[in-house]
Amino acid sequence: MARDPNLNALWCRAIAEELRRGGVGDVVLCPGSRNAPLLFALAAAFPDAWSHVDERSGAFMALGAAKASGRPALVCVTSGSALANCAPALAEATYAGIPLIVVAADRPWELHERGAPQTMRQAGALAAFLDDELDLGEPTGDDAVIRALRARVSRIAQCRGPALIDVPLREPLTPAPDAAWDDARLSREAIDGRGGDRPYTALGATSGSLPPADLAWWGGELRGVDWLKPGVKGLIVCGANAAGSESTWPGFLAERTGFPLIADAPSNARRCEHAITLADALVTGPLGRTEPELIILVDQAPLSRAVYEYVGRQRCPLIVMEPGADRDFLANAWAAVPHPDAQAWQAIADACAPGDAEWSRLWRDAQRRAYAVLEAAMRDEPWGEVLAAHVAVTHPGFRTLHLASSMPVRHGNLHAPAIHVAVFANRGLNGIDGTLGTAIGAQRGDAVPPGLLLCGDLALLHDLPALAALAARPPSPRAHDLTIVVINNDGGGIFDFLPVAQAADYQRLVRTPHGLRFEHAARQFNLAYHAVRSREELMEALNVSAVSGVPRLIECIVDPGAAVERHRALVKALAGS
């Protein structure tokens, strides 16, 4: 008797098995008819798979899980526009270097380009956002074809970039037995692959980094290069870390050399004693006129315009450490180290230690004075967006911090201290799309509860369907232990900081005030809810949230017109401290 009831079942089981054996971690299943055989097969291979009704936020949930766990994550969708809904998450995954895999069902070939329902050209539709695309033909009961299917899927699962597996399927789409189906002529490798947990084709590990300890990286000789040396005024600038894990190597380099480490909050490199966490403000003051003799730029671009403009003004040697793709967005790198390993970091440290002690002291002293100013300012800060963000990101009761794009990530970057929590932010494309889904997925993936998400009202409105995952039963303990702090400033408050705010009809066309509150949304998705209008009310709500273990929405109601003045006044005070 055949192990599988029909050819579709074997085909989809082979895909699911090789994805699991190849290292895929979390799986989000989005319902549909055409993808039903895939849903059944993936649910069997991944018993903890998560079902979510919306493909767009479901794809971001998989993205967040991959961020937190460091393992590829997968979203399965049906045919047609369902796949198009994955484009925003795939775009973020591409530019952040996140291993997100989309498995999409497709319609048979004869229905394409004929006006058939729920049918679009899926192959190549998202090619700009993919490292790999497997455009399968329809299931075939040929031994060599099934073995080739396993081989290709196993490779995709083990690679580290965004990928699409497009799976055309004919009826039957249910696991109904097919009397004509017989697998007796198939080999063991076709039916079961390599068995156990072994991928069909195992990819060997490679270093991905070339530099030996003698620093002969760039052409092999480095004739005339004298800028990697002891005593140099070095500066490390560390942008967002895609995975959200602790970045130990920038801190190692700072400890060895004494170089100041400008570390964005999502870099997860702020635990180092040389970390400069208030650089967003400091480089707008006297420190902005300093001239380092060497800059080492790590990972994503700095999120602060003031910081990357400071870096862009310098004409000293600049090394770009690139865990993923080309990161020389300023186009002034003297050298790049792709996929740096321990040997690369060690080599730079050996060449430059110790750095200029007076230079390091200059930055640390400025940071210490600025911290004193920040603490005093926040004691007297009136209720509003700045104070709400400060209280939320400095609350000690949370183990994971998620920062939405626009103003929340900027507030978090300025106010979050040398934190001992994992910090996540979508900084591949810096958009607000998928904010809730990414945070929910990261908490489920591997983030430590309790988690806190700081977001704006537009980010919340943009991703409301993701809240259905928090209302799901049975609950996922880590994902459900998430507190969402939304700063409701009635529209796109970040635009108030930009020149467009002076344009005619700015309010209607750009800032787009909506006049909405979120109490009813919280009730719809079974979230505990607090509306707060003061420091004391916010602290009380956070204290409850930190120990409750249930999903919660805290809405900070603030004056929509006060943030620009308060934020700029604070930055000015810190810069001149």
Image: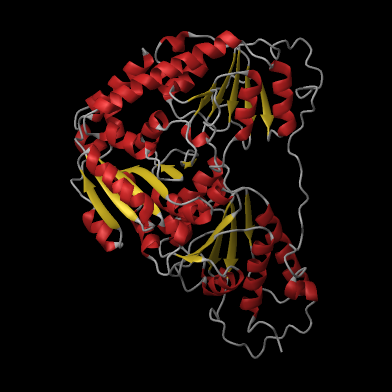
* Quadrant housing the N terminus: bottom right
Horizontal side of residue 340 vs 459, given as left or right:
right
Horizontal side of residue 140 vs 549, given as left or right:
right
Horizontal side of residue 302 vs 293, given as left or right:
left
Residue at (37, 20) in percent of width and height = 372
Residue 24 in the image: state x and y as whole percent. 62, 58
Residue 26 in the image: state x and y as whole percent. 55, 59
Say which quarter of the image contains residue 396: top left
In-front residue for pair 63/254: 254
The answer to whether one can see residue 512 in this image is no
Q: Is residue 370 above or below residue 407?
A: above
Residue 519 in the image: state x and y as whole percent. 22, 55
Residue at (19, 35) in percent of width and height = 559
Colouring chosen for the image of the structure: secondary structure
In-front residue for pair 148/306: 306
In-front residue for pair 576/130: 576
The answer to whether one can see residue 531 in this image is yes
Residue 43 in the image: state x and y as whole percent. 55, 71
Residue at (72, 10) in percent of width and height = 226
Total residue callouts: 0
* Quadrant housing the C terminus: top left
Say which quarter of the image contains residue 286: top left
Horizontal side of residue 186 vs 499, given as left or right:
right
